Image: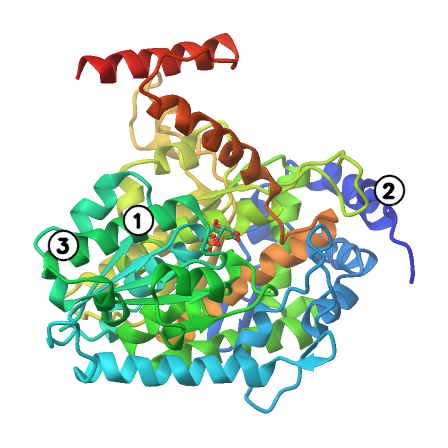
Amino acid sequence: MKTIAPLTQRASWKSLEVHFEKIREVHLRDWFGQDPARGRVFGVEALGMYLDYSKNRIDQETLKHLFALADESGLRSAIEAMFRGDAINITENRAVLHTALRAPRDARVEVAGRNVIPDVYEVLDRMGGFCDRIRSGQWKGHAGKPIVNIINIGIGGSDLGPVMAYEALKSYSDRSLKFLFVSNVDGTDFAEAVEGLDPAETLFIVASKTFTTQETMTNAQTAKDWLLQGLGAGQEAVAKHFVAVSTNATKVSEFGIDTANMFGFWDWVGGRYSMDSAIGLSTMIAIGPANFHEMLTGFRQMDEHFRTAPWESNIPVLMALLGIWYNNFFQAASIAVLPYDQYLKRFPAYLQQLTMESNGKRVTLSGSYVDYDTGAVYWGEPGTNGQHSFYQLIHQGTRLIPCDFIAFCHSLNPVGRHHDLLMANVFAQAEALAFGKTLTEVRSEGTAEWLAPHREFDGNRPSNVLLLERLTPASLGKLVALYEHIVFAQGVIWNLDSFDQWGVELGKVLAQRIVPELESPEPLELRHDSSTNALIERYRATRKKG
Ligand code: G6Q
């Protein structure tokens, strides 16, 4: 195998450094002035998705160096290794095969010599049958009533995807069913979710890959108590009101769930890459199996595009490289994702986990510390709300924040003029960020001299605009797969294991140690640092007072 030089020693990296010095001050006003066709030249269309990346601080030479970086980093062979099922998650010795979750029924993907595609479809088909029974009212609860409330209990990867997808595809959902999501170990989350619900009509999906996660198991136990108490029934009622999504059959049946109602997935599906596995059971109940399969088709089309398109027309690769350009050369620490669609209100939250848990790392695959920045902070809110809040900083602050605008040509709720107004705002924001408003322009409006600098917009603030036709299950699949592959491509270039998450372990272990210290009725000697000791003592004393 060809060895790849450390990132900052790659020839393409060095070329990028030299090139960056040449163009770092060039203004987008100049780029556009020099090339009247720029707005179309730096645009690419694939799968009904149009990416306008002309408002980025790049020229053709930048792209040439970035593509060379992708080549020199072995991106093409890394993509093949992932799709093939190599154990690329090296710290956990696991294959990374979320792409197998949406492969066609007749595909063949092997893990340890076994074709996993029939397993994927066995689960999808069982999910489909189960969803049909819930949606038709054929499935009855313990008291003989059909299910109308579905509560997904899960956290992290077992929650964020399901919530995001439910919100995104609400317009396709069965409105006679109510969907709720409980994730936080804070009892308020559970209490508020079940407020006013009839246990006899409620189904809990316990979504946990490991079935050992503290938050999820605590919420599941509370849900069981609430259900049995509410129904005045014994353990036998559990099977009618609880199903599980897990890889751990033993724990599932210990909990009292009939393993016939357990929907499995596999250790080659990472939590944050699992919304299209059985973890998406709530999504499938909401939108129905046919729409769920449409979503999988969207994922699959983006997979194929990522795998086969040349870099210059490969949307995930272009966006990944632009992200690296800003992160590592312009030192931009964050990226704002700004969906101009209310249905995508949880998409930024979903992306926070996908991006930051994947690439928030400082050790390379060979175990050395990086000497460059890695994963950017992803954040955002749906437009136009963000405009009346944090956009001030993006327009006039001291930090460079590249933005991804996401918008749809057709609204799912074409009410009056709303959609044109919404879209006018997307186009205007990208325009304002790029071109700004010069001091001369401000002065020419008669603005007082002392006020002029406050009203100047320096511009040259980059953005991508992703324009799709309409928000459908398939377009959601494409969007999610797009960001999955952006994360992957960046992880390859930064030489990280994008599929582990050791950084979440320490806090979990320390919390387990502290729980008995908070609960002990006896006075005890604390052995933490003086700050942690004082906080625990204060908490205990306050609780004692009642
Ligand atoms: C995601 C992480 C993490 C995980 C949760 C829930 O990639 O692994 O967010 O999804 O900790 O884990 P369980 O599904 O095992 O409860």
Q: Is residue 150 above or below residue 326?
A: below
List x then y, in percent, for residue 521.
31, 19
| Mark 1 Cα shell of 10 Å, populated few (<14), some (14-19), many (≥20) | many
- Give the spatial CA distance, label 1 vs label 2: 49 Å
Residue at disc 3, secondary structure: helix
Q: Say the numbered circle drawn on residue 219.
A: 1
> Does residue 440 appear in the picture of this structure?
no
Please name the residue that numbered disc 2 is placed on.
Answer: 9
Q: Is residue 446 or residue 247 the one in the foreground? A: 247
Query: Residue 364's image quarter?
Result: top right
Please tell me which residue is depicted at 55% across the width and 86% down the height of the picture. Answer: 104
> Does residue 248 appear in the picture of this structure?
yes
Residue at disc 1, secondary structure: helix
Q: Going from the N terminus, do you reach mark 1 or mark 2 first?
A: 2
Looking at the image, which residue sits at the far right? Answer: 2
Quadrant of image for the C terminus:
top left
List x then y, in percent, for residue 470.
34, 73
- Give the spatial CA distance, label 3 vs label 1: 15 Å
Quadrant of image for the N terminus:
bottom right
Please name the residue that numbered disc 3 is placed on.
Answer: 229
